Each structure stands twice: as structure tokens, then as C-alpha cells.
Amino acid sequence: MPDTIHEQSKRLDFLMGETQSVYHEATLRLGLTDSTMDVLYTLCQFNGSCPLRRIIALSGMPKQTVNSALRKLESDGILYLESVDGRKKRACLTEKGRELCRGTVLRLMAVEDDIYETWLPEERELYLSLTRRYLDALREKIQEL
């Protein structure tokens, strides 16, 4: 008998939770905190420089959590903040930050790429398409709450 919509929704929730748990484990194994990993991961996606607003939006973390992580990374010499267009700022990796990313974030990204490489191109596109569709619908439904 096929799963009901509710059962499938629970399965998806559990899979997303387990996925987050595996990422948390990876982050700890690489010697970082979750918020540090999320900030550095986002910076690596943009070649080491990214507006703060974009880091907040793409990381999914609250603004205060991102700001706390940025302050810590800045004090450790991993990144610096620079002003762009007046009040806007962007985070930029230092050479020390790039070195840290090579040993942590880029290793995790390589693991992800290795996994996706085992999928057929149409499987990757289907996964991305369905994930985007789910996210867009979820955003819309949350606005209706």
C-alpha cells in the first residue's frame, strides 16, 4: 500500500533532519561550528567575497547568528569586512581564511560533488527542480499562515 501524503511528509522531514545531523557531524569533524561552516561555505560559493545580506539569506541563519560568526571570524583573521555603497558591507576571506577553507569547506564541497557525480544528469536536474518547487510552495504557504 502506498504511503499517504502525511507519511511521505514525515519521511521527508526525517530525511531533512538526518541530513542536517550528518552536516553537523561533518562540521565538527572539520573543527568548525555550524555557523562558521555556513558563513565560510557561502563565501566559498562566491569565490571568497559576498555581501552580508546574501550570506544571511543563503545560509538560512538568523541575522544575529551570522553577525556573531562574522565577528569571531574577523577577530581570528579569517575574514575582513569592507563597506560597499555606504552602509552595505561584504565579507572577504583573508589568505588565512582561504587556507582554512581549503582544509574544511572545500573538502566538504568535494564530498558533495563526488556524490552528485554518481547521479545521472537528469537525476540531478530532477532533484534540484523538485527541491526548488517544494521550497517555493513552502514559502508561499507559510505566508498564508
Image (cartoon, helix red, strand yellow):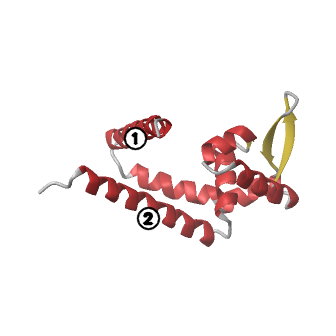
**Residue 138 versus residue 132: which sits nearer the camera?**
138
Residue 122 location, quadrant: top left
Q: Residue at x 73, y 44 (%)?
A: 48
- Amino acid bearing label 1: Tyr
The residue where tag 1 is placed is 134
- Which circle's residue, 1 or 2, is located before the other in the chain? 2
User: Callout 1: helix, strand or loop?
Assistant: helix
Quarter holding the N terminus is bottom left
Crowd rating for badge 1 (residues with CA inside 10 Å; few <14, some 14–19, many 20+):
few
Left or right: 86 with respect to 6?
right
Tally of marks? 2
In the rendered view, tell whether residue 13 sits above or below residue 31. Answer: above
Provide residue 116's location: percent of width, then percent of height: 42, 50
Provide residue 138's location: percent of width, then percent of height: 44, 40
Left or right: 143 with respect to 88?
left
Q: Which mark is residue 18?
A: 2
Crowd rating for badge 2 (residues with CA inside 10 Å; few <14, some 14–19, many 20+):
few
